[in-house]
Amino acid sequence: MKRPSFMEDTIARRLAVTVTLAAAVTLVLLELFFTFGGKWAKPDIQEAGVVSQVGAVIRIVSAAPASDREHLARAANTDEVHFAWYPSDSLLAQALQNGHYSSDEISEGWRFLQPYLGQHPDRMVVFQENNPVSRTAGLPYDRSRFDDAYFAGIQLDDGSWILCVALQRFWGLYAFERFCLQFLMFALWAIAVSLIASRQLSRPIEHLAGAVRSLGLQPRSARLEEDGPREIRLVSETINGMQAQIQQFIEYRTTMLAAISHDLRTPLTRIRLRGEFIDCPEQQKNLFRDVDEMQAMIDGALSFFRNDASREDSIMFDLPGLLQTIANDYCDQEFFVEYDGPAKAGYVGQLYAMKRVFSNLVENAIKYATPPTITLEASGDGGYRILIRDRGPGIPPDALSEVFEPYFRLDKSRNRQTGGVGLGLTSAQTIVRSNGGDIIMVNRPEGGLEVQIILPKIR
Ligand code: ADP
């Protein structure tokens, strides 16, 4: 078989394209995530190097002579951290000195800053805007703009204080939260990509499976469309070839059986003529009865093959309308057939073939049981269920599947009076199945037979 070129639509190419696209989009997303992720995507204070920067400023200011300290501290201001130095007798130094700090605030100060300071300062506190010290007048930042500041105060040997104000407490989420968020986003993205990819691959296969299923139910349905990826096209082509062969075979079989049935009429007529010469009236009567029966069987077979061969087009028709008409026709003949169901419901199918099916089943109920009730129900999948219920003897459970066999009759003598040859249910089943549906028979617990005709929505 010729190897497909990469330009051809194949499942392998779809897979490769989907995976490549997914990888490319993931890369772009990652890039966008880190570029425009907003401040939450940035690292927190420690990772941003702010703490080491603060440590350096403190070291420089504390090493400088007292006269330069205020000036130096102010010069170290950045967009992120503001600094100020307060001599021991200043109001702010007093406030820092006399402030109340929780042991947490103090130990946090040591944890954060100590590693960057080189030598132990006398006192070191870290506090937030909920500490009253943060509201002392004259702090070196605009409180209305930065309401989430973070303060570190370091007392030097001479009792003066250096105050550092980190204007924003966090530069982002903590690493664990960031990881969770990234994980969640990429998990969602991976799910979305795999859903799209599997949909891309499974859709043509599902489509093909649906088409093959309806082909199985309706051997005469239209050929499968030969489109989609190469592998699916190949399968469709093969199935179309098989379908053509099956159709040819069915046609051949039908034509042959119809010809045999037709040709049997002539010898049968001859037998009947010869029967006229039989002297014994009893034997003659028996022979004529057998000939009549064979004649009926042949006529039944011929009409079955004619119906089978007819390719009626499917059209949209009013299913309740059809059922009501059948019920009314029998009511006119004084068989009280009741219809129960919606007044209007469109259905696409073979109108005349379906009419033969329902009439046949109603006729059977009248012949072998009682005039039935026809119930129409919508089934969930857009199709319908028609129930034909009578109150007759029903059918023995072991014969329930056999009644659909050609020429099967339950009680020969009973049927002889009724005139059937045992092809009615066979024909009904063939028609319903060729319309994509099915017929099921069940004995009702309260007595009588229920024939269920299931008609799915024709897609
Ligand atoms: P026929 O031409 O004999 O009516 P069918 O295929 O229509 O052939 O029916 C097959 C057999 O199924 C009938 O001979 C009859 O014995 C049985 N049958 C069909 N419908 C009913 C029914 N409603 N109640 C009882 N028996 C039935």
Image: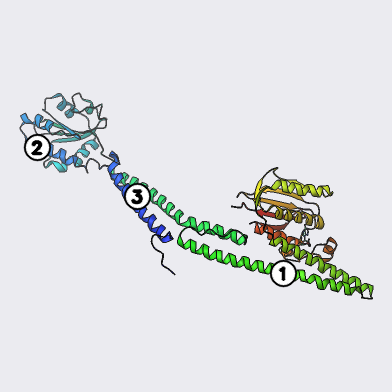
Question: Dot 1: what SS?
Answer: helix
What's the mark number on residue 25?
Answer: 3
Identify the residue shown where x is 70% and y is 68%. Answer: 255
Q: Earlier in the sequence, mark 2 or mark 1?
A: 2
Residue 384 in view? yes
Q: Of circles 3 and 2, which is in front? A: 3
Image point 60% across, 68% down: which residue?
Answer: 245
Q: According to the image, label 2 marks what residue?
A: 60
In front here: 222 or 184?
222
Quarter of the rendering containing residue 57:
top left
Query: Cβ–Cβ below 8 Å for labels 3 and 2?
Result: no
Q: Residue type at mark 1? A: Leu
Ligand 1 neighbours mark 3 (CB distance < 8 Å): no
Label 2 C-beta lies within 8 Å of the nearest ligand 1 atom: no
Q: Earlier in the sequence, mark 3 or mark 2?
A: 3
Q: Nearer the viewer, residue 113 or 148?
A: 148
- Please state the horizontal and vertical placement of residue 411, each as a whole percent of the image: 81, 65
- Residue type, numbered disc 2: Ile
Label ID, residue 24: none
Q: For mark 1, does the 10 Å Cα neighbourhood hold few (<14), some (14 to 19), or many (20 or more) residues?
A: some
The residue labelled by disc 1 is: 257
Residue 94 placement (x, y as % from top left): 15, 26
